[in-house]
Amino acid sequence: MAAQKTETRQDYNYFLPLQSRWMDNDLYGHVNNVTYYSYFDTVVNYFLIEKGGLDIHNAPVIGVVVESHCNYMRSVAYPDLIQCGLRVGHLGNSSVRYEIGIFKNDEEEASAAGHFIHVFVERETNKPVGIPKQIRDAFETILAETGE
């Protein structure tokens, strides 16, 4: 198995600060693994609303998650401050792969890193459609350089 690349703050160009919460900790004294997915969802949806103009209540086209993954490198625990780094790793016609890094306090290396994939669908029919232009334009501002 190949060694995993260390994710650093320089790998991302959009960040959302979050305060960890007391309830995020589990009995082992650190943020529970499932909570990281909540952080992922928060940064992605904040970006979609803030930069992509998504109206989460009325938009005719929405993104639905079809895949998710997370690697955990270091523990995060309340009251750590969190920075969620976001980039787009792949941009298709109707799908996008978000890549997220979770950074605690002022650390340069990610405590956790992962991805999830949205497929954009018509809200009423749940049928895949092209990513709306305003959202696609926002994605292009955080599209990762692939070196290709």
Image (spheres, helix red, strand yellow):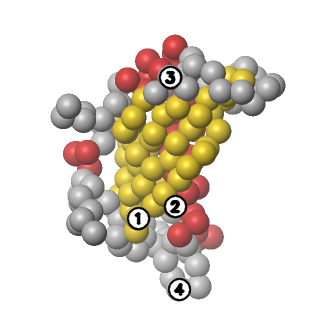
Identify the secondary structure beneath mark 4.
Answer: loop
Give the residue pinned by disc 1: 71
Give the vertical position of 143 relative to 60 (above or below).
Answer: below
Q: How much space separates mark 3 and mark 2, taking CA atoms?
A: 27 Å
Disc nearest the viewer among 1 and 4: 1
Mark 3 secondary-structure assignment: loop
Label 2 with label 1: CB-CB less than 8 Å: no
Q: Mark 3 points at which residue?
A: 93
N-terminal label among 2 and 4? 4
Task: Give the distance between the C-alpha atoms of the residues marked 2 and 4, in whole angstroms.
Answer: 15 Å
| Residue 38, position as x, y percentages in the image | 58, 55
Q: Which residue is drawn at 63% across and 21% down?
A: 129
Mark yes or no: residue 83 visible: no
Residue found 65% across the figure and 39% down from its top? 64
Alpha carbons under labels 3 and 1: distance apart? 27 Å
Q: Do the residues labelled 4 and 3 touch (CB within 8 Å)?
A: no
**Counting residues from the N terminus, which is met first, the one under dot 3 or under dot 2?**
2
Residue 28 is tagged as 4
Please, what is the three-letter code of the amino acid marked with disc 2? Tyr
Single out the mark in the foreground, 3 or 1: 3
Q: Residue at label 2?
A: 36
Residue 4 lies left or right of residue 85; in this view the side is left
Label 1 amino acid? Asn
| Sequence-first tag of 1 and 4 | 4
Q: Name the mark nearer the viewer: 4 or 3.
A: 3
Identified by mark 4, the residue type is Tyr
